[in-house]
């Protein structure tokens, strides 16, 4: 994920499962990116970067965490798709039609990797009530 972000002119100093992306090169604030990505169905948090020139409630960066991606079982190919969806959303932050299209693509990708689906069935729990054992 970090290599693709680097290839898209974002910083290359990422070495953790949680990282901050400096958006100044993309000419977009963290707040604007957070809003655009939310509209595109992708959750990130705006975040200050070191020596951030923006106010703390605006910021120059976003924070991205990979545990939500890997917990679903997504791999390199899906991460590449997500990074390109993020980049497309950031480049087209004011295009509501395109952001809705990106949201549909993100939802379609996530539908292939449902949260906890394998764990519930493996442990014989009911999906309708996670605290009750299935009687089937």
Image: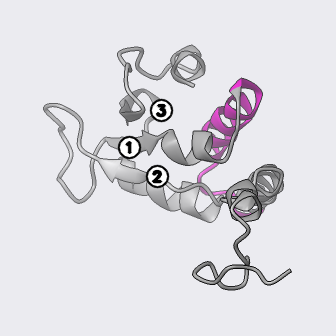
Which residue is label 3 attached to? 26
Q: Position of residue 63 (x, y in %)?
A: 38, 43
Describe residue 33's horizontal placement relative to residue 80 as left or right: left
The Cα atoms of the two marked residues, 3 and 2, are separated by 16 Å
The Cα atoms of the two marked residues, 1 and 2, are separated by 6 Å
Disc 1 or 2, which lies upstream in sequence?
2
Image quarter of residue 84: top right
Q: Residue at left 77%, top 63%?
A: 121
In the rendered view of the protein, which quadrant contains the C terminus? bottom right
Disc 3 or 2, which lies upstream in sequence?
3
What is the magenta segment's predominant secondary structure? helix
Q: Which mark is residue 37?
A: none
Q: Residue furthest front?
A: 135
**Crowding at mark 1 (Cα within 10 Å: few <14, some 14-19, many 20+):** some
Q: Residue at left 64%, top 60%?
A: 41
Which residue is label 1 attached to? 63
Magenta-tinted stretch: 76-97
Q: Position of residue 113 (x, y in %)?
A: 76, 50
Q: Are marks 1 and 2 in contact (CB under 8 Å)?
A: yes
Image quarter of residue 25: top left
Element type at mark 2: loop
Is residue 4 shown above or below 18? above
The Cα atoms of the two marked residues, 1 and 3, are separated by 15 Å
Q: Are marks 1 and 3 in contact (CB under 8 Å)?
A: no
Is 82 in the magenta? yes
Which residue is label 2 attached to? 44
Q: Residue at left 37%, top 56%?
A: 31
């Amino acid at each position: 994920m970090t290599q693709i972000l680097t290839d898209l002119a974002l910083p290359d100093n990422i070495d953790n499962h949680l990282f901050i992306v400096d958006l100044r090169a993309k000419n977009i604030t963290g707040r604007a990116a957070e809003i655009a990505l939310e509209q595109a169905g992708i959750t990130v948090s705006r975040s200050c970067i070191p020596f951030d020139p923006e106010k703390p409630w605006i910021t120059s960066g976003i924070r991205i965490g990979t545990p939500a991606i890997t917990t679903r079982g997504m791999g390199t190919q899906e991460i590449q798709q997500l990074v390109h969806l993020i980049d497309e959303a950031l480049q087209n932050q004011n295009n509501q039609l395109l952001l809705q299209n990106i949201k549909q693509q993100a939802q379609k990708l996530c539908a292939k990797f449902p949260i906890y689906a394998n764990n519930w069935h493996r442990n014989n729990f009911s999906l309708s009530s996670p605290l009750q054992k299935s009687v089937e």
